[in-house]
Image: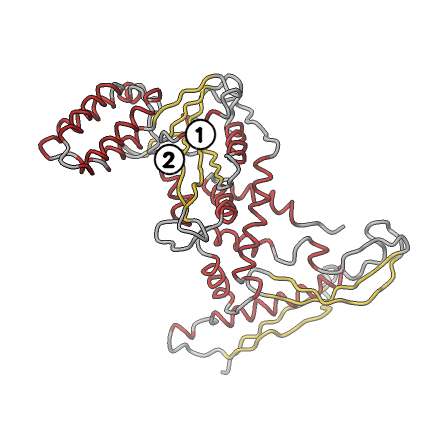
Amino acid sequence: MNESIRIVVQHYDTSNSKILSQEVLREDKIKKPQNLKEVGYLHLEQIDLLSKIQDFKISHQIKLLNNDKTCPKCAGKVRNQGRYKSKVHTIFTDHEVDIKRISCTCNCNLPYTIEGIFGSKTHPDLLKRQVELGSQQSYEKTAKELNYNSLAKRSINNHSNVHKAVKKIADILEKDKLGTVKISHIPAQQLVINIDGGHVKSRGDNRSFEAMVASVYRPENIKVIDRSHKMIVNKTTVASAKNDEQTTMKALFKNACKVQGMNESTEVVCLADGADNCWSIANSIKNDCGKMLYVLDWFHIGMKFKNNATAVADEDKDLYDKAKWHLWHGAADKSINKLESLYQKAPDDKCQKKLKKLMGYISNNRAHIVNYEKRMNNNLPYTSNIAESTVNNLINTRQKNKQRMTWSRDGSHNVLQIRSSIYSQTWDKDWREVEQSIYKNVA
């Protein structure tokens, strides 16, 4: 017996099941597969089948769109002004349709392209995927991946269009994050903020610029995974690479605090690495909360001591550890005294320079050094190690590490808006706002 499979798509009247039109999309003989490649349809065949199904459905949808007898704006009688070809790009396939151009007696300026009617010719599924991939990897790699999925070199997915998509969505996200904030209905008694920065190689020269990142969360949202690991289950993260004296960053940061429930009585604990720009960002909310405590982040102190350990001879390691121990107990002066002794014994200028820099770091941040052991024992925030991956996740992974690309500030800033939304786990919610901003509904 010869067997075949026929794939048919039908357009029918649901009231009486009468078939109005139909099309045979494929006919294939059923054969015993000799290898796995022959099982089912190949990637290219699946895309071709999907494209034909899309063409069939879209053509009937456009017929309904072209069927309007009255003006959707004024309800007046319309006149046919011809048909115009218009493109629509779905996530895997591209299509061209004929849109009827109409005018009416009141001279309404009626759209006659997919973009004019719906706000964009790019389907939301495709636009969202372009932006998600573009925030994770280079635009060139994104274009290649999207085109591979479609098995076609699609102009809508080229490097330039992915770049434009990221910028467009980033602008909408930033505008939304800078707008009026709906403050949490449960005011926060305390908030913890981690502020840090990462350097990004600048385009056009050998210099770099700093992108700033801040994460805001409630202490009660720190959940213990096991004895060695904790995680923050609800946080708001914002970032900026703009060269505007931190104006944008401070505004985003203030709204992030409000999202997490900050009011005039909230106590805020700021953990930062000691850089002036970090303290400046934190200071921007001091009049909007009840009390602020600035703490030099123990994570960064630990990294400083680790990175400068080579400046100390093996026989002096105990003294070096003692200096760190004093700092752990909040005794900055005693720690500096120990380091002074090591400075005098340093074997060369390079080692002295490292120790002097470490002493300067402690001295400059003396006002923000606390008794870390006491805070740890009282389960109070003293380190950002829980959220330290923020800079790596938001900046380094996409814009540094093994990436060899250079960046403009605007390009870096745009990517950071997407990554901040994803990292804050608000991306799906934010995307719904984006869709409402870009796409229009037809009456």
The residue wearing badge 2 is 387
Which residue is rendered at x = 57% and y = 53% of the image?
A: 165
Q: Is label 1 in a helix, a strand or a loop? A: strand
Does residue 243 appear left or right of residue 346 in this picture? right
Q: Nearer the viewer, residue 112 or 300?
A: 300
274 is higher (above) or lower (below) than 332: below
Which amino acid does the dot numbered 2 rest on? Ala
Gap between marks 1 and 2 measured at Cα = 10 Å
103 versus 286 height, above or below: below
Which residue is the extreme one toward the left? Answer: 315
Viewer-proximal residue among 357 and 84: 357
Circle 2 Cα neighbour tier, 10 Å, few/some/many (<14 / 14–19 / ≥20): some
Q: Which disc number belongs to residue 217? A: 1
Closer to the camera, 5 or 223? 223
Query: What is the quadrant of residue 214 in the picture?
Result: top left
**Element under label 2?**
loop
Where residue 81 appears, as percent x and y from the top left, is 84, 65
Q: Where is residue 166 in the image (x, y as percent from the top left)?
A: 54, 51
Quadrant of res 10: bottom right
- Whether the residues at callouts 1 and 2 have beta carbons within 8 Å, the answer is yes
Percent x, y for residue 134? 49, 54
Q: Is residue 312 above or below residue 427?
A: above
Instruction: Name the amino acid type tagged 1.
Output: Tyr
Name the side, left or right, on which 44 lies relative to 297: right
Task: From the viewer's side, name the closer residue of 345 and 186.
Answer: 345
Question: Where, by quadrant of the figure, is residue 299 drawn?
Answer: top left
Q: Which comes sooner in the sequence, label 1 or label 2? A: 1
Residue 440 % position (x, y): 69, 49
From this viewpoint, which residue is outermost toward the front?
349
Residue at the location (43% across, 53% down)? 406
Residue at figure coordinates x 45%, y 30% from the top left? 216
